[in-house]
Amino acid sequence: MFCHKCGAQIAEGAAFCHKCGAKVIRTDSDWSEEDTCASQPFQATSAASIDPATDSTPEQRPDASVQADAPVDNCIQPIMQDHTNSIEFLGNRFEITEELEAYIAVRKPQEQAAFEIETHYLTIKDEMLSELAEIVCPEEKKFVEAVENDIKSLQQLLDSNAITPLTEFEVTTLPQIGQRIIFKYTKNDSITARQIHSILFTKPRALYLKVYNEFFDDVYSSVEQANSLHEGLKERRVLESQRSTPTYRGYGFGIRGTVNAVMGAATANMGMAVLQGFSNGLTASSDASLVKQRTTQGLMRAKQNLLIMAQEQVKKLTEICLDYLFRDMQAEIDALNIKPYRTFSQKDQTTIELRNENYDEALKEGDISPERYVAYAFSALCDDPCSQGHYCNLVQAACTLGDRGAADKILAFTAKLGIEQSVKRTIESESEGKIASLNNLDENDLKQTKQKIDIISKLYGTIAATETKRLRARLKCLEEMAQAHEKSKKYQKLIATGSTTVFIMPDHTVTALDSTEKVAHLKNVVSVAKGRYILALGSNGTVSFGGRDSKLVWPDAKSWRDIVAIAAGGQHYVGLKQDGSVVSTGQNVRGACDVSGWRDIVAITCGSGYTVGVKSDGSVVACGQFWDSPGSMVSNRLSSWRDIVSVSAGPNHILGLKKNGTVVAQGLKSCDRGECKVSDWWGIVAIAAGRSFSVGLRADGTAVAVGDNRYGQCNVGSWKNIVAIVCGSICTVGLKSDGTLIAVGDIKDESHKLSTYRLQLD
């Protein structure tokens, strides 16, 4: 065995040449079964040393002493030394030989020319997409408006039982747009509008027909219903005709005309004429509610299909334009005639490409460790030392292993090959794509934000660095808000206000500012709520009542167990159990106590005539009605709320605090006193709703309020160091970080008493 660099003979088992110090590069014939990772660090090997059967290098085969996915850190030091003409990473080394240096001298200017060509075409691509959007968007908007208008017209006709054919749509402008774009930016001016039309409208037909199959099922079903109805109407007309004054008149529609029109239209012009055919064959019956329901469902589905079709056309048009553009770009790059480093037979070339594809894909999918990929990549560089993909992946592997220094040095090595600019661009593009793929992770969620940071921080490039910095700032904000929210939620249990203010003393007894309220019997209390009566939650998970009346306890509340939170409305009371279910007691005049089926609840609140619960997924459930509007179901107004962490209810409006520190509101008469104008609130960690006013607590301990301020209940702008807030009908009470209480508004002239109390905070 001889040294590949100086030609000196190498002793059996030696790792380095005794004459020049070069690392030994072995072939399969030189490798022995007894060699181990400890005695023989991995060397860059030739393509021949990759076993096609196992897709692994010799030391990674099952019978080697180190298994394929075994960590190599125990065998080699993860360091990279700076050699002028070499690259070394995780004990693997590749260097620029005289032969390679001569090749680079020729290729380097070609690589620069290729980079300039790519830059030129990428600039054109941006201009193309910009112009495409500028031209297509108005056309798409007109199309959508036409669909909306005709759907609306058809629905009105259905309601009036007077169906007429729809107007024809004209959407063939999209192919002309494509032709203009392609002519302007590419050399492929031989393409015709007919060819584009074929691509845009003919090829996707199978997809659209599949989409419409469900629509046709509804058509058949509605037609069958109509035929049955029609037969019944015939018999009824006979009976009605025997009367002096007929009382019924209606029409059905035939299966043959409708189905033929719909199917024929879909085949001829896809989804566009589904509505046309539908209207041609359809007449409504004033007594056929089911037929109308089916027809409306069909129309809505047809509308959706039409809009999907328009989106698909625009998407396909964009793909066509880019395809022709990049064909021209590749033709210019091919004209540079960049020669490969080595020439292989077709069979060998196919094997090498397959090997590269397998390893690159495995790294992206996380099927192999970065250490294993590094070993493979160094061996592959012997075949293709200018492979941009390998260097991109080596940089990413270095970042994944936490070695940014190695990533920088790998890029420095690519500069010697003349491919640094292209590699950097590819890395940035891949990082940008990876970041875009993480859009499904919610940045308002602590766990998902941490997950996003963990992934992006391991990417390389300025885009990843900027995004990581932004996300870390976001995470810090979320953590501070979460801590402030949890603190406020904990301290808010200590106070409640309504007709009077009550609070929990350091000895876990309850004090009421109004001395006529009976609270002396309330012991070991951890949370209070105020409605007509005072509801107290004990440390053992049971509840007790206090107040002026001697008959204070509803019998069914005595059986409550495992309660973790309480809420009080006007005359009803609710408890949240540890298992996420909810119990209630009191007067159920408007359905405010209908909570028996609730599950997975994490927070509750009560208005005067309703109850609201927050589920663990951030959605909201409700029962009951607003106090000033009997029949106005609260649940109908909250169905769209998402990402909610807590709620607060006034008599006629509800506040919802979102994970991102913003607030949403719903109420009667569009909250005409301004109590629902909370859309510009930010950094909120606690909310409180009074009668026609709203108060929010920010993470920095300041407060903000909107709505009715006739009694000064919104004068909280000067408050500082607040950790919890509650609202009565016309007052606001705040708990400060030193345990003292502060209030504004009308609280029965008892606000001066608050300064004499100090609550115990952790």
Image (tube, helix red, strand yellow):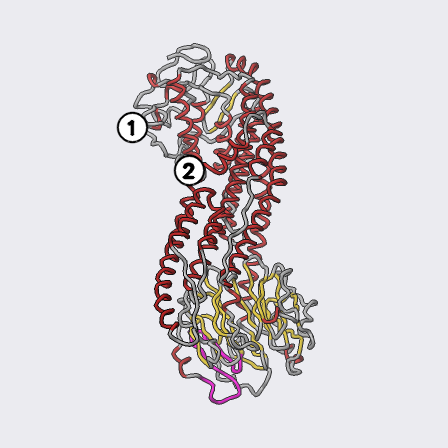
- Image position, residue 270 (x, y; %): 46, 44
Tag 2: residue type?
Gly
Tag 1: residue type?
Asp
Q: Is residue 169 magenta?
A: no
Can the viewer see residue 293 in this picture?
A: yes
- Image position, residue 238 (x, y; %): 36, 70
Q: Residue at x 50, y 42 (%)?
A: 312
Packing grade of label 1 (10 A; few <14, some 14-19, many >=20) is few
Can the viewer see residue 526 in this picture?
A: no
**Distance in Å between CA atoms under marks 1 and 2:** 23 Å
The quadrant of the rendering that contains the N terminus is: top left
Give the answer, above or below, for where 483 lies relative to 436.
below
Secondary structure beneath dot 1 equals loop
Instruction: Quickly name the residue at label 2.
Output: 366
Q: Which one is nearer the viewer's eye here, 145 or 256?
A: 256
Tell me if label 1 and label 2 are in contact, CB under 8 Å: no
The quadrant of the rendering that contains the C terminus is: bottom right
Q: Which one is nearer the viewer's eye here, 285 or 533?
A: 285
Front position among marks 1 and 2: 2
Q: Is residue 541 magenta?
A: yes
129 sits to left or right of 69: right
Instruction: Quickly name the residue at label 1.
Output: 63
Q: Which residues are magenta?
A: 531-553
Give the answer, above or below, for where 425 lies relative to 554.
above
Q: How many marks?
A: 2
